[in-house]
Image (tube, helix red, strand yellow):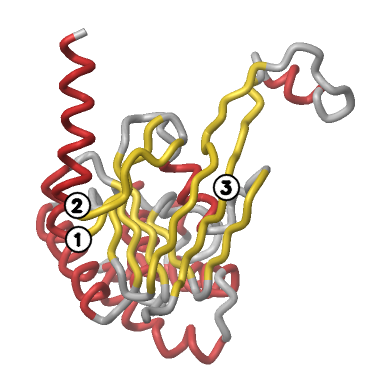
Amino acid sequence: MSETIISFKNVSKTYILYKNDRERFKALFFKPLHMKTNRALNDVSFEISRGESVGIVGDNGAGKSTLLKMITGVAFPDEGEIIVNGKVAALLELTAGFSMEMTGRENIYLKGYILGLEDEYIKEIEEKIIDFAELGDYIDQPVRTYSSGMKMRLGFAINVNIEPDVLVVDEALAVGDASFKKKCKSKIKEIITAGTTVLYVSHSADSVKEICPRAIYLRKGTVIHDGPTPETLKIYQDYKASQKKK
């Protein structure tokens, strides 16, 4: 039996919607009387085995990003239990955690420390990251001098080269020019072949089919279907088509 690497058991998450920053600040001291809320996830349960590649599909606001943030430890459930067994790398906000005043090389170490990596291990993978990012001499310049594309390339290079147990990808393949995008896709396929568990969110059905044999369809925070990708995509696309007719 395959080892379970990610487990969601009856997970729910509700966000309070504030009108403005003033309302958000006041809520730190006083409980709002008339709260508007958004149920981002509603009683979500599933298990993912080590080495699986699973697509997460659904419209904007379906709860996909909240689900991924919970796997990476950025957000936490109000109800239910989440278990993640292993090191997680996330291609979500690729530049999160960078110090703009530090050089690209220094940021490799900073991101490594944030991910809980040891000095010795970061030294081992440092040159692989630098080669992959293709930043040339800019690697030793402050990150504030980088273009947005250069920052994303460095973020991508770090996350795909730390040999994660779980790789979370959210539409992050649009990094750099065509040749670099091709390189990114190739690296993700290599990671999958090596047995890394991949969770992949994309609005491109072809992309999900190419990478993931299994897909989970979320609608308004609820799991509508979890099964083989062609089957899941058909249910999702049929629902979208039915909504257009209304």
State whether residue 101 is above or below residue 186.
Answer: above
For mark 2, does the 10 Å Cα neighbourhood hold few (<14), some (14 to 19), or many (20 or more) residues? Answer: many
Query: Dot 3: within a 10 Å radius of its alpha carbon, few (fewer than 14), some, or many (20 or more) residues?
Result: many
Q: Cβ–Cβ below 8 Å for labels 2 and 1?
A: yes
Amino acid type indicated by mark 1: Pro
Q: Amino acid at mark 3?
A: Val
Q: Amino acid at mark 2?
A: Thr
Separation of disc 3 and disc 2 at Cα?
A: 23 Å
Task: Report whether 108 appears left or right of 191.
Answer: right
Residue 25 position in % (x across, y down): 78, 25
Q: Residue at x 15, y 39 (%)?
A: 234
Asked which secondary structure carries label 2, the reply is: helix
Q: Earlier in the sequence, mark 1 or mark 3?
A: 3
Element carrying mark 1: loop
Residue 178 located left or right of residue 111: left
Which label's residue is closer to the chain start, 3 or 2?
A: 3
The residue at which mark 2 appears reads as 229
Percent x, y of residue 80: 63, 50
